[in-house]
Amino acid sequence: MEEIIKDTYQVLYAPSEGEYKEKGSKFLAYAYPITSLDDFEYYLEEVKSIHPKARHHCYAYRIGIEGKIYRANDDGEPSGTAGKPILGQQLSHDVSDVLVVVVRYFGGTKLGASGLINAYKQATIDAFASATFSMKTLSDVYKVEFEYGQMGHILNVIKSLHLNIKEKVFEASPFVLLEIPKSQTKDKIIQLKAKILQVSEEQI
């Protein structure tokens, strides 16, 4: 059976915020699109600078098409009551390349483990409720070099296959950079070679 390559996944289009209040405690959620651990560190510090007096800055993030890079942190809350429910909502919404930081201001009344879990969950849900999501596609980039005399033929072939040209360079050694979704790479490269060489795909 041929392996099915997944090349699209849902991401956060832009930052969003949410809020949840329970027994005097306030939970402020900040959701950010991220693509690296550097992004995560930058936004976490940004939230801390906005709320330096908050008792807790709990968070969870997921990065990559399957969210294989992830972390959940309770930042002093009882284990499993903050980071885990935040991460749980990222999984429930099937979103990756995302960081959610939830800031807590203690209201004087303890909520208990179940109350905390629900509060961090609801704050994250509220942030996602006002968020815009988009689909991200993973692509491979290929460089196609050619002689000037071949330019018209090459560009016509690329157009006929509806391939996306990421960059064109028509200098001493002309070439184009093609961006092809990972799930289509194998078939498109075979079709491209066949059409350029004007042979059947079976001959490639």
Image (spheres, grey):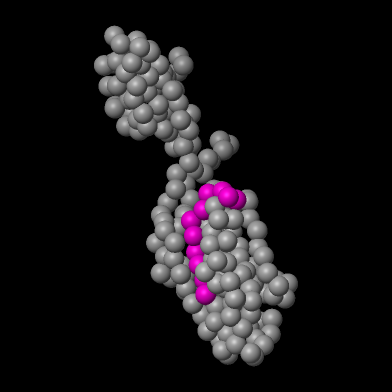
Front-lying residue, 74 or 203: 74
Task: Give the left or right position of residue 194, taking residue 64 as reference.
Answer: left
Of the pair 17 and 141, the residue shown nearer to us: 17
Residue at the (49%, 60%) spot, across then down: 32
Identify the residue shown where x is 29% and y is 21%: 155
In this rendering, the count of numbered labels is 0
Q: Is residue 142 visible?
A: yes
Decide whether residue 52 is among the magenta residues: no
The answer to which image quadrant residue 109 occupies is bottom right
* Snapshot quadrant of residue 91: bottom right
Residue at the outermost right position: 79
Point out the stretch of residues depicted in magenta.
Answer: 28-38
Q: Position of residue 1 (x, y in %)?
A: 58, 37
Whether residue 119 appears in this view of the structure is: no
Compared with residue 53, is residue 1 higher up or lower down, i.e. above or below? above
Residue at 49% over, 77% down: 19
Question: Does residue 30 show up magenta in the picture?
Answer: yes
Rendered location of residue 197, percent (x, y): 38, 12
Specify whether 138 is left or right of 115: left
**Percent coordinates x, y for residue 183 in the rendering:** 48, 37
Residue plotted at (57% across, 61% down): 44
Q: Is residue 28 rendered to the left or right of residue 165? A: right
Residue 199 locus on image (x, y percent): 38, 13
Q: Residue 57 is drawn in which quadrant?
A: bottom right
